[in-house]
Image: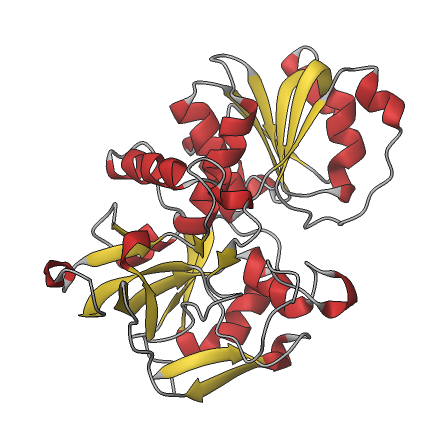
Amino acid sequence: MKAVQVTGYGDIDKLHVVHIEKPHPKENEVLIKVKACGINNTEIWMREGAYGADKESGWRPEGVQFPRIPGSDITGTVVEVGENVDKSILGRNVVVFPFTSSGEEGTEHYAEDMSFIGSEYDGGYAEYVAWPESLCFPMPLEDFSQSAVFSVSGLTAWHMVEQIRPKKEETILVTGANGGVGSMNVQIASKIHGAKVIALVGDPSLRDRMKELGASHVLSYKSAHLAEEILELNGGPVDSVLDVVGDALFKTVIKVLKKGGKLCISGSIGGQTTHVDLRDIYLKHITIYGSVLGTRKEFKDMLDAVAKGKLKPIIDKTFPLEKAAEAQTYFKQSGKLGKIVLLPEEESEA
């Protein structure tokens, strides 16, 4: 099969298009013919070594074992089954739950043995992938690309919003609102929970599209007086913040949070370390949540909301599989709205 492997920590020159033997499903596994694979920060940071110290980057302490096929937002068709798998699943279109874990229900996302597809297992930058049958769910939409945008980004956003538990009419500030997770945060907070959302983006031309997703107000994070604009716009501090940016906006979000406010962090695309005056945290009684991925129940709930039309798929651009390096480079550019998706069956132009 055709696949894209990461051969070590580094830049996009570590991504190589290869032709290797396709995997065979083991006991309790199925073989999926990959139809679409969304791109996430997680596989880029895995390649860059951003998740771990001393370049041992991955979800497990030992780091990633190279070569590795990245990719976790996977949809496709089941074409082969391993032992102990009912053959009735053959031909079914599925979306992949992105990690294995022995954790009990509700804690599986932070169990010590949590292992991620595309990091600890070969993932979806390939024509085929093998995965446990129990972690394959019916696609929520008929379109493979549209269904692929929800797996990791949707689960991450759904869990973030669950952490802060917004009440109707509360104001939620969403950073990185035009990205894969951010655009989901806007939709979930506004359309599922009825909150008022202030979306922060870099490109003002995205204003109308962000409002279509449910944002009440859209501001540019590039403003020199951003905190003051947020406070004036909202008539005071906001109730909660859903943040994927980190350092670049950390002082701002702490400043605009109300006393007793909540901050949920699930990313640091604007800097992984920051300086904080702890008095700003404890004197304001701010609760901070660290958030990564989510539970299988939340995954099911999120897919159900998608199937019912409550959440919309947002795709910025698609690329053929062999242009994965170009796609990852494009992913890191600003001004996009929604997900970037790889299509294994699409051919590059000559």
Which residue is at a point 29% across and 66% down the rendered structure image?
35
Measured as percent of width and height from the top left, residue 241 is found at: 63, 27
Which residue is at a point 70% across and 13% down the rendered structure image?
260
Q: Residue furthest left?
A: 88
Q: Is 22 on the left or on the right of 289, as rendered?
A: left
Q: Is residue 177 above or below residue 322?
A: above
What's the coloring here? secondary structure
Measured as percent of width and height from the top left, residue 3 is found at: 41, 80
Seen from the viewer's position, the closer of residues 204 and 126 is 126
Write down the quadrant of residue 199 in the picture.
Answer: top right
Write down the quadrant of residue 36 in the picture.
Answer: bottom left
Q: Is residue 12 above or below residue 178?
A: below
Seen from the viewer's position, the closer of residues 92 and 255 is 92
Measured as percent of width and height from the top left, residue 334 is found at: 62, 54
Which residue is at a point 54% across and 34% down the rendered structure image?
160
Seen from the viewer's position, the closer of residues 113 and 170 is 113
